[in-house]
Image (tube, helix red, strand yellow):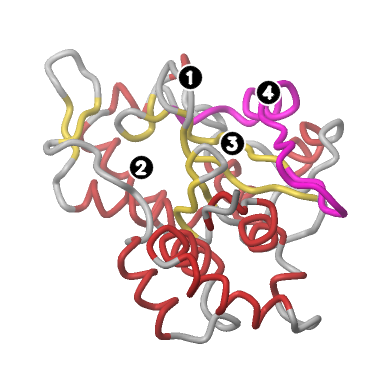
Amino acid sequence: MAIDQIHRWMRDNAPHREALLQPPLTGLQIDELLTDSGLILPKEAYTLYGWRNGVANRECLFPGYEFRPLEKAVENLIRDWRDEALRGPHTHAWLFIFPVFLTYGGYALFCDMKPRATSAVDYDGLDAKTDTLADLMGLVADRFAQGSVFVDDEGELDFTDGLGPIGLDRDSCYRRVLEGDWETMSQAVLRIGFQTLAQRHAELAVHNSLRMFEDPSSRIWQEPLIFKDFIIKPELLHFP
């Protein structure tokens, strides 16, 4: 498990940081914290918070990004992060689990009222990054395994060569959208690839997406994030 790899690195290389990890939450505690939000966390979020409930003192789990305790993440979700861009039957919000250290933005988990095993992670709730929280943690764990993380003279975590993007490669997703079956590829690949396609070849994006619009059984009507990107964001297609 990726989070265990990160934990081992902290234990071996930064025990003073490991000491800041907060005690895990039970499933019942997680449910209680979500009571007023009206949302359901995917199972993988239960796994993450069942490992540790964030890092104390708004400190980072990986360089530049806090690991926010669930109660704080939910407070911010209810107060600040509810996404008003999506209209229609879907109610959803973004849970900022890994916000940028002491500032705005970060990696946020998609949450709605539907039980899910996994859920998408976006940056700022706008820019698709991965299909699952586990995918994101795997990419972060790779940075630790590759020796890209170190402890600086002040005891803080840092990257040897800068953070760089964490997420799926946009050009790869773009090529897959051009060449593949949109109905079968993963949600993040489709969203990233479609966004890139729309920016580079708007007419082709419209033509291809009509295949999904015209099919009532298409996943576009069933997956709210795809629906949102294709329907609610015409600016991607440079419409007036």
At label 1, the amino acid type is Ala
Using the image, determine if residue 36 lies above or below residue 133.
above
Q: Residue at x 64, y 48 (%)?
A: 110
Query: For the residues marked 4 and 1, what is the alpha-carbon distance in whole angstroms?
Result: 21 Å
x, y percent for residue 152: 14, 22
Q: In the rendered image, which residue does mark 3 sit on?
A: 24
Residue 160 x %, y %: 12, 36
Q: Secondary structure at mark 2?
A: helix
Distance from Cα at disc 4 to Cα at disc 2 = 30 Å
Q: Amino acid at mark 3?
A: Pro
Q: CA distance from mark 3 to mark 1?
A: 12 Å
Q: Are marks 3 and 1 in contact (CB under 8 Å)?
A: no
The residue labelled by disc 2 is: 7
Per the model, the C-alpha gap separating discs 3 and 4 is: 25 Å
Q: Is residue 233 above or below residue 176?
A: above
- Quote the CA–CA distance across marks 2 and 3: 13 Å
Tell which circle, 4 or 2, labels the residue nearer the N-terminal end: 2
Q: Residues within 10 Å of mark 4 (few under 14, many from 20)?
A: few
Count of all numbered marks drawn on residues in the image: 4
Asked whether the beta carbons under mark 3 and mark 4 sit within 8 Å of each other, the answer is no
Quick one: 240 or 173, which is closer to the camera? 240
Give the residue pinned by disc 4: 80
The reply to whether dot 4 and dot 2 touch (C-beta < 8 Å) is: no
Q: Earlier in the sequence, mark 4 or mark 1?
A: 1
